[in-house]
Amino acid sequence: MPGERSERTKMKIDRIELFLCYLPYVHFFETSFGRQEGRTFILVKVYADGMCGYGEVVADKSPFYSYETASTAWLMMKDFFVPLIFRKALAHPQDFYAQVGIYKGHPMARAGLELALWDLEARSQGLPLWRLYEGIHKEIPVGVSIGIQDSVDQLLERIQGFLDEGYQRIKIKIKPGWDTAVCRKVREKLPDIPLQVDANGAYSAGDSKRLKELDAFNLTMIEQPFAPYDLWDHSRLQKELATPLCLDESITNVEAARKAIEMGSCRIINIKAGRVGGIIESRKIHDFCQDKSLPVWCGGMLESGIGRAHNVHLAALPNFTLPHDISASKRYYAEDLIEPPFDITARGTIEVPDLPGIGVYPQEERIRKAAVNKEVFRKEDF
Ligand code: OSB
Ligand code: MG
């Protein structure tokens, strides 16, 4: 495992800070779950030897995407994961990963802490995260995920705007009633762009006939048509579809990935560190998929620049080959929490930062402004 340290030089975490934050979006984001105007999330700071690492918990205010919320994640960290780190003197993310497995569930809460420990570890070694992860990509291909709009014309206008900005592919959110007719109109206007759709589990097996109509639109993939637990119906649908299925919510760990692949439930996997509990589990899924010749890409949860920086470094791994849901800072927030902001190159890519840790500078003043609650935990209190 790269990034391992000897006992002698092991860091000791002496303080952990949690910030409950809210940032308004530049444009509302609507999925099959509903419309949102901004994002609630938790920033995690872990301190050791005068250094600090940053992580982000992607759990939202409400349990739409998963059962986790910002409140449940806060509680799990406070009652279980933070005490575990202090009591067992865990500082290396690998040690945290090995020990936190005694508890069930709550991957987003774990991931926030694991990410912060990775940032700290990388900073202490003076290396960017992508080197610790053994990444190879110096820049990563990126796309944009566009929510459900008030009208198809508005959607077409937004798509054109993002294409003009240089994004390599477009993903649109779909739900029953905002699907085939929308895809047809997009294809009439833009017959050749790389286009994919994401249903966030809005369909059920009875909708299979309708979903098969999507084969007509030359989509790169259809993401998560059915419920997260439903690998079986995904496998039945994939057999009848020419378009590859991509699973997001269903892939909660490497075991779920193995079962999905063995059952033929998908041909592509979207990896999100938050959904699967951190970088170590993400790498296991990445490696397993690589072994099975399945391409993966990095999904997003509309993170602040801190969470997005973590995604960018993860996406530097070799088998992350398809364009990611990692967009420029200004696509999400008027003022991101980092400097410099992420921008799109003329090649439709984002450059992987080469400075230590996440490789971008968190802006403390902006974090304070975004924070609606804060809690500090000290080693001496455990
Ligand atoms: O399903 O990929 C998803 C955002 C929030 C929750 C779930 C999803 C999304 C996105 C946005 O599609 C991707 C991004 O961060 O750009
Ligand atoms: Mg998705």
Image: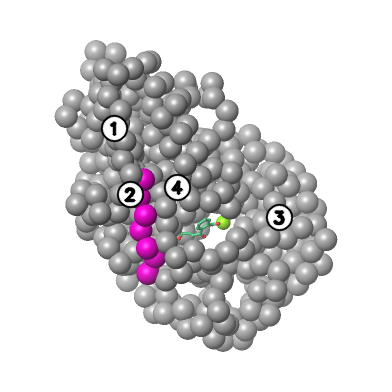
Q: Which tag, 1 or 3, sits closer to the chain's start?
A: 3
- Between disc 1 and disc 4, the foreground one is 1
Q: Position of residue 351 (x, y in %)?
A: 31, 57
Q: Is residue 367 left or right of residue 300?
A: left
Q: Nearer the viewer, mark 3 or mark 4?
A: 4
What distance separates the C-alpha of mark 2 from that of mark 1? 14 Å
User: Which structural element holds mark 1?
Assistant: strand
Which quarter holds ligand 2? bottom right
The residue to which callout 4 is attached is 58
The amino acid on which the numbered mark 4 sits, given as a three-letter code, is Val
* CA–CA distance in space, label 1 to label 3: 40 Å
Q: Amino acid at mark 2?
A: Val
Q: Earlier in the sequence, mark 4 or mark 2?
A: 4
**Distance CA(mark 3)–CA(mark 4):** 22 Å
Quadrant placement of the C terminus: top left
Q: Marks 4 and 2: which is nearer the front? A: 2
Q: Nearer the viewer, mark 3 or mark 2?
A: 2
Residue 192 visible to the viewer: yes
- The secondary structure type at the circle numbered 3 is loop
- The verdict on label 1 being within 8 Å of ligand 1 is no
- Give the residue at mark 3: 226
What is the spatial separation of the Cα atoms under label 1 and label 4, in whole angstroms? 20 Å
Whether disc 4's CB lies below 8 Å from ligand 1 is answered yes
Which amino acid does the dot numbered 3 rest on? Answer: Phe
Q: Residue 376: which numbered mark, if any?
A: 1
